[in-house]
Amino acid sequence: MELGIHGADRDNMDLIRDLGVSWTKIPGNIEPETVPDLNEPFDVAEELGLRCVVDLRTSHGYLSQVSADTQMAMAEAGLLEEVTGPILDLEQHAKQARNLEKVNAVAYAKLYETAARTVEAYQDRCQEWEFWGEAACPWVSGQVFGDKSSTYPVLLESVYKAIKEVDPDCRVWTAGNGMDLQLVFYHACLDHGAGPYFDVCNLHPYFMKLRVRKHADRILEQEYTRLRVALQEQGQDQPFAATEWGYPTYDADSIAVEEYLRSHVLLEGVRQLYWSESEEWFEKDLQAMERHGFEVVVVHSLHDDPAPNPFWGQRCGLIDLQGRKKNVWDVVQRWAWKGREAKQQAL
């Protein structure tokens, strides 16, 4: 199992070399329907010897707007079935589903094309492409994919086919999700027929509400095992990976400590881990991921963010606001070098 880090840039190259990670994640905004310029982050990654996974994403506003515009135009042109009567009526529901399928094919055609052109443009620099990271997060996606992820598999299938036409050897990763190991998103995707249309089952396996370690251990074993069975039965037994994982941590002696940090989805916020407990959480999570065959785990992130009234993700750094390496630095570094050395021995 190899480790990666978010935020690989020129200012932190010495730190990243010392940490020993071998991967990084790069954002790839394809909303303007133009190929993004990713040469600088690819250059940095190449200098550091890092492999990249790129998150091909738009805003949820883009998806909503193009869908609404297309649906209105197609309805006015008489290209959609008329839906009448109670929406819960099975016949009317089936009409609505068929209409949605027609709309999606037209509305997102340029999105699929842009994704394919991006992969084609950088196929000599990257072979790993995540599609629409955190699609199930209500804050990130605005629930544009639906409560039961019924829309995401349709888009994933189309993006997968478009990408594979230009680079059959690349790998398509699912959106990362999985707060508190609630993996219903992945089961819903498989139930909706997405099994053949991704190469890597990508998770963001944060525990956010839970802070009892023995309960976390039980849930990790239960949910990773259950999803592995589902991938074997409904998918292609795809490998696990994580393009984002970590925990907000703090030293009791740090300046202006806040125990609970803001969250867009948890009203009570997310409790930071004390340094005294964080090593155990990092270690046992990584042990579980290795045990369940994760290929790559990208840690979020290198530095804490100095933003006031912090969001929980801004305190997940391996280096605190005073510039100190947190104790979990040593945990990540040990696992990173272990993964790098194992990879080199296998070559």
Image (cartoon, helix red, strand yellow):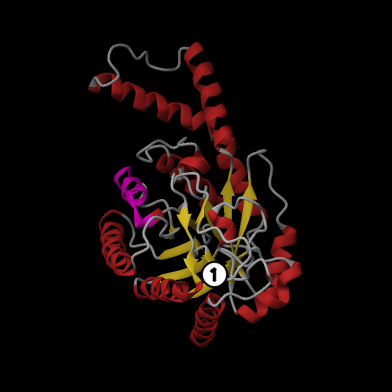
Residue drawn at (35%, 46%) of the image:
189
Residue 22: percent from left, percent from top: 58, 74
Disc 1: which residue: 252
Magenta residues span 180-193
Quadrant position of residue 304: bottom right
Residue drawn at (62%, 53%) of the image:
27
Quadrant position of residue 199: bottom left
Is the residue marked by circle 1 packed among few (<14), some (14-19), or many (20+) residues within 10 Å?
some
Residue 162: percent from left, percent from top: 53, 46
Q: 289 above or below 161? A: below
Tell which of 160 and 247 is nearer to you. Answer: 247
Residue drawn at (69%, 74%) of the image:
48
Residue drawn at (40%, 43%) of the image:
153
SS at mark 1 in the image: loop
- In this picture, residue 56 sits left or right of residue 288: right
Question: Amino acid under label 1?
Answer: Ala
Residue 220: percent from left, percent from top: 32, 65
- In this picture, residue 221 sits left or right of residue 82: left
Residue 41: percent from left, percent from top: 70, 61
Tell which of 225 and 151 is nearer to you. Answer: 225
Q: Is residue 184 magenta?
A: yes
Q: 28 above or below 275? A: above
Please tell me whether the stretch drawn in magenta is mainly helix, strand or loop: helix
Q: Is residue 96 magenta?
A: no
Quadrant position of residue 94: top left
